[in-house]
Structures are given as structure tokens and as C-alpha cells.
Image: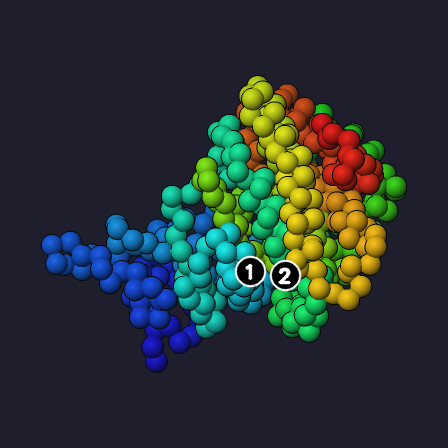
């Protein structure tokens, strides 16, 4: 039996053999021309993954490289619970679809392997992860336009606004993602509101605040319940499902969305809300760092993402919306307002769970001064609660500014 005809978890050595074995199936003959003095260059691999779930290798010969991403059977950080390896199929298929629907917005998938539960994709080595850049105070003026256009493309082409409702239902079926959705349902909603497993924590100064304003706040928990049920039941659009700044590669003039293993059909405001949430978290970090210029840019970027989204929506609606009733007077405006209200609600939930839950980000965690860290955490918790409770006030066409 060939070495790769049965699943096993690869390491830096076997992943090199894997790329060699699959070389002919890669869409581009990536390593064919890489020679030094006529000699084929040796391939090497390095594990570069820093996520919670998968193994990510850069495999290259010093001149060219590819990324191999393999799903392991368990979460890397907490063993015990199996998470379906089908997530790698979902990730590969959505990236291939987005490659067609939103050209230039995602890395190219060269190969998906259902036996090894891995994919081989374009190495975007000349890009940086947006969170890392933002943490260094960098700004990306093109980003709001890029992300808005990507999200509106997905909305127009994968939701029922497009008149091919049967195609949409095929995609709903193909992208059913029970294990990964269960993680989000638990971490973004249940744990953030109820701390069921007792694993949440905040800085000691904020413990009373979190108890009274979140865990004992029946009104907030009721709104979170509505958002959770909407998340679970409104199969509106094919979502990325985990669109934080660690899932976005940036260069000054280009943006690439990656890591969509949490993809599923859900409410459009979920992805847009995640983008807004992680920008607001990054802005608070810049505030703690005293970097006023970067903070101002990030806060402006939040409004720009929303205004670009509205503009793209208006432009694309007339061309793309083909459903029989979608041209009915008032429908277009109602549909958009619902998305924007959801956006604020899900942004609030995301901010809260990233501040108090187990899946924290470096933005706040990395603030060295404990007082500043607690202050950033407190301000973000207030922002998160405000966004959930007053979601019709923010991100609408005549919205208030969020601090
Ligand atoms: C067990 S996975 C924890 C978190 O990391 C991912 O990026 C998702 O956001 C998930 O909630
Ligand atoms: Mg991820």
C-alpha cells in the first residue's frame, strides 16, 4: 500500500514525502523548474501553525513553497474531544468556491486530499497576518474596501438574493459543519454568557463587573439567546465563520481571506460583525499602547468597512439580486438594515467572548502593564454589552459612533 492511502498525522519529514508523492497532481508544476546548477533542490518542511486545531507546514525548496494544512483528529491544545476531520474538506471546497466567486480574495487551493484530510495551497509568504501588523501599529487603507467587496460578493452569489435557490440549497447541504458550529455555539454564546465550564477568566479588577453585567444580567443573556438561535437557524449566506484578523493576510494593496474551516450557512452579519469586533479590539490595544494615530485609523476603518459594505450592496443589488420578490419596494433596505443590526449584535458577542472566554487574542493578552490590560478589558466589555443591547443604533446608515 502506498504510504498515503491511509490517514495518519504527518510530521515535518513525512510531509516532504507527501509533497513529492503528490507533485504531479499539483495544479501547477511548482517545483519542476527549481534547480541549482542543474540539480533538483531538496525540499524541506517547517511546521508554522499557531492555531488551536490543525497542523500547517510550509514545504519548499528555498525558491518556491506551498502550504500543507492537515486536520488532526483532536484539538491541538485540549485533547479529549474529537473534531471531525471533514473540516478540511469544508475549508478546501469553500476556498475553491471563493476563488471563483470572489477572484483574488483567497489563496489558491492546488489539491484537496480526502484520505489524508489535508490540502495543499498557495503560500502567501509575502503577506502578513493582519493581527500581527495591527499589533505593530501598521495601517491598511485598502482593507475596508477589500473586505466589504468580498463579503458583498459572497452575499449576492451564495444567498437567496441570487435566483438559483436550488444551487444555494446544495451549498447549504455541502457546508453543514456540525462540529465546528458546535464550538462557536458553545464558546461565542453559551460560555460567554453563563461560564458553564468555569474556564472563563478576567483581570481581578473586572471580576465583579463581569459577574453583575454579564452572568447576572438577564436582559443581556436574553439578547444573546436570540442571537444564538438566529446564528443556528438563519441559513442566509455562506459564511467564513471565524473571520478575525488572524484569518486575514494583508499587504498594502491586497487582502486575502483564509482559514475558513468554521464555514457554514448563517446570518450575513456574523462575518461582518467579526471583522468589526476584531478591529475594535485592535483599536483598544493601540489605545493602551498610546498609539493615537493607529487607534484613530482603526476606528475610522470600522466605519469605512460598513460604508463600503453599504455602497457595494447598493451597487451589486441591482445587477445580482434575481429573486422574484427581491425588487419589491422597501425589501432591499429592510434586508440590509437586518444585516447591519446583526452585525452589531455579533460584534458585541465576539468582543465579549474574546475578552472573558478561553479563546483570547494577543491584542489584549499582550498588554504588558496589568492596569492598562484591565482597563482595555473593561472598556471592551462595556463596548460588547452596548453593541448587543443597542444593536439597532450601531452600524446602520445613520449610526452612532462606537467608542
Ligand atoms: C477550539 S477553537 C477556539 C477558537 O479558535 C478558533 O479560531 C475559533 O474562533 C474558536 O472559537
Ligand atoms: Mg482558525
Q: Secondary structure at mark 2?
A: helix
Q: Position of residue 65 (x, y in %)?
A: 32, 54
Mark 1 in CB contact with mark 2 (< 8 angstroms): yes
For residue 42, which quarter of the picture?
bottom left
Image location of residue 257, percent across then percent down: 52, 50
In which quadrant will I find the C terminus?
A: top right
Where residue 232 appears, as percent x and y from the top left, is 75, 59
Q: Which class describes the residues within 10 Å of circle 2: few (<14), some (14-19), or many (20+)?
A: many
Q: Residue furthest right?
A: 219
Question: Where residue 201 sits in the image (x, y, percent)?
Answer: 68, 37
Color style of the picture:
rainbow
Q: Quadrant of the N terminus?
A: bottom left
The residue positioned 62% from the left and 56% from the top of the image is 154
Observer-nearest of 272 and 12: 272
Q: Is tag 1's residue or tag 2's residue first in the polypeptide sequence?
A: 1
State whether residue 183 appears in this view: no
Marks 1 and 2, Cα distance to the nearest angstrom?
Answer: 7 Å
Question: As drawn, is 179 to the left or to the right of 86?
Answer: right
Residue 283 falls left or right of residue 24: right
User: Which residue is identified by label 1?
Assistant: 101
The secondary element bearing badge 1 is classed as helix
**Residue furthest bottom as drawn:** 1
Of residues 315 and 229, the one drawn nearer to the viewer in this rendering: 315
Q: What number is the disc on residue 157?
A: 2
Q: Nearer the viewer, residue 323 or 280?
A: 323
Q: Residue at x 24, y 63 (%)?
A: 32
The vertical placement of 84 against 79, above or below, is below
Q: Residue at x 44, y 58 (%)?
A: 108
Amino acid at each position: 500500500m502506498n504510504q498515503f492511502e491511509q490517514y495518519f498525522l504527518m510530521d515535518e519529514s513525512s510531509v516532504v514525502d507527501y509533497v513529492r508523492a503528490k507533485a504531479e497532481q499539483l495544479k501547477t508544476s511548482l517545483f519542476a523548474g527549481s534547480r541549482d546548477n542543474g540539480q533538483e533542490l531538496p525540499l524541506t518542511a517547517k511546521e508554522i501553525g499557531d492555531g488551536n486545531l490543525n497542523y500547517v507546514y510550509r514545504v519548499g525548496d528555498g525558491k518556491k513553497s506551498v502550504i500543507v494544512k492537515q486536520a488532526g483528529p483532536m484539538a491541538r491544545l485540549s485533547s479529549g474531544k474529537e473534531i471531525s476531520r471533514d473540516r478540511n474538506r469544508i475549508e478546501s471546497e469553500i476556498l475553491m468556491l471563493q476563488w471563483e466567486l470572489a477572484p483574488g480574495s483567497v489563496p489558491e487551493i492546488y489539491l484537496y486530499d480526502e484520505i489524508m484530510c489535508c490540502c495543499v495551497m498557495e503560500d502567501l509568504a509575502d503577506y502578513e497576518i493582519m493581527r500581527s501588523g495591527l499589533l505593530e501599529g501598521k495601517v491598511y487603507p485598502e482593507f475596508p474596501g477589500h473586505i466589504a467587496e468580498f463579503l458583498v460578493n459572497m452575499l449576492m452569489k451564495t444567498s437567496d438574493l441570487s435566483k438559483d435557490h436550488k444551487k444555494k440549497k446544495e451549498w447549504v447541504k455541502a457546508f453543514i459543519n456540525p462540529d465546528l458550529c458546535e464550538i462557536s455555539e458553545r464558546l461565542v454564546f453559551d460560555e460567554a454568557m453563563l461560564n458553564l465550564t468555569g474556564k472563563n477568566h478576567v483581570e481581578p479588577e473586572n471580576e465583579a463587573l463581569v459577574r453583575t453585567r454579564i452572568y447576572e444580567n438577564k436582559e443581556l443573556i436574553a439578547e444573546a439567546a436570540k442571537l444564538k438561535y438566529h446564528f443556528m437557524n438563519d441559513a442566509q449566506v455562506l459564511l467564513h465563520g471565524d473571520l478575525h484578523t488572524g484569518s486575514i493576510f494583508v499587504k498594502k494593496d491586497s487582502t486575502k481571506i483564509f482559514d475558513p474551516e468554521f464555514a457554514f450557512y448563517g446570518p450575513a452579519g456574523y462575518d461582518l460583525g467579526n471583522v468589526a469586533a476584531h478591529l475594535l479590539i485592535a483599536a483598544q490595544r493601540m489605545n493602551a499602547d498610546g498609539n493615537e494615530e493607529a487607534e484613530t485609523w482603526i476606528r475610522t476603518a470600522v466605519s469605512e468597512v460598513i460604508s463600503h459594505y453599504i455602497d457595494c450592496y447598493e451597487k451589486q443589488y441591482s445587477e445580482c439580486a434575481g429573486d422574484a420578490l427581491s425588487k419589491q419596494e422597501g425589501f432591499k433596505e429592510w434586508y440590509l438594515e437586518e444585516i447591519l443590526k446583526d452585525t452589531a449584535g455579533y460584534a458585541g458577542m465576539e468582543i465579549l467572548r474574546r475578552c472573558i472566554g478561553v479563546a483570547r487574542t494577543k491584542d489584549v493578552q499582550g498588554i504588558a502593564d496589568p492596569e492598562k490590560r484591565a482597563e482595555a478589558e473593561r472598556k471592551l466589555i462595556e463596548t460588547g454589552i452596548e453593541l448587543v443591547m443597542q444593536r439597532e443604533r450601531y452600524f446602520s446608515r445613520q449610526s452612532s459612533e462606537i467608542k
